[in-house]
């Protein structure tokens, strides 16, 4: 979201000692060219991404419940809620965040805040 990644080249596992069981790749992160689709509410976007990845092995539906998205709103979302957060693209997260922007005050309120009367 904050940059454009570009894979430069792969590095053989034989380049390391001891030889790892994984392959490596060198990636360039271009921070001058951020992701073209922007979130309407940056704070909401970050809370949704962090909140759903906190329950990464669970479905998106469970992760969104943990960030105070009302159950009635879940069914209106344009994303498959049975997916896991790691299956979503950056575009999916921005779309999700923008779809919930009208609920930002509810989602972003913290447990320590006093309810207004």
Image (cartoon, rainbow, N blue to C red):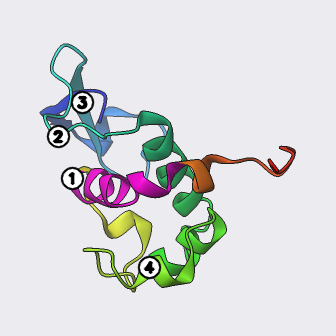
The alpha-carbon separation of the residues under discs 2 and 3 comes to: 25 Å
Residue ID for mark 3 = 26
The residue that appears at 30% across and 49% down in the rendered structure is 23
Q: Which residue is mark 2?
A: 37
Q: Is residue 88 magenta?
A: no
The image shows a total of numbered marks equal to 4
What's drawn in magenta, residue-wise?
Answer: 91-104
CA gap, disc 3 and disc 1: 23 Å
Residue 13 spot, x, y in % from top left: 31, 44
Q: Return the x and y of residue 51 as percentages of the image width and height.
A: 58, 57
> Residue 99 colored magenta?
yes
* Label 2 vs 1, first from the N-terminus: 2
Specify whether 5 is left or right of 87: left
Residue under pointer 4: 74
Indicate whether 3 appears above or below 14: above
Residue 91 is marked as 1
Question: Horizontally, is 79 left or right of 35 in the view?
Answer: right
Measure the C-alpha gap from mark 2 to mark 1. Answer: 7 Å
Please identify, in this view, whether the residue under mark 2 or under mark 3 is nearer the observer.
2
Please state which of the two labelled residues, at mark 3 or mark 1, is closer to the viewer. Answer: 1
**Between 105 and 78, the one nearer to me in the picture:** 105
Which residue sits at x=42%, y=35%? Answer: 42
- In depth, the one of 105 and 65 nearer the eye is 105
Q: Which residue appears at 54% of the width and 69% of the height? A: 64
């Amino acid at each position: 979201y904050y940059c454009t990644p570009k894979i430069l080249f792969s590095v053989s596992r034989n380049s390391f000692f001891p030889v790892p069981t994984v392959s490596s790749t060198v990636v360039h992160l271009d921070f001058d060219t951020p992701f073209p689709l922007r979130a309407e509410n940056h704070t909401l976007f970050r809370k949704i991404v962090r909140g759903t990845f906190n329950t990464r092995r669970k479905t998106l539906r469970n992760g969104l419940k943990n960030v105070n998205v009302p159950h009635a709103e879940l069914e209106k979302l344009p994303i498959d809620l049975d997916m896991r957060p790691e299956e979503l693209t950056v575009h999916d997260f921005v779309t999700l965040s923008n779809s919930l922007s009208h609920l930002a005050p509810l989602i972003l309120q913290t447990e320590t805040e006093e309810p207004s009367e």
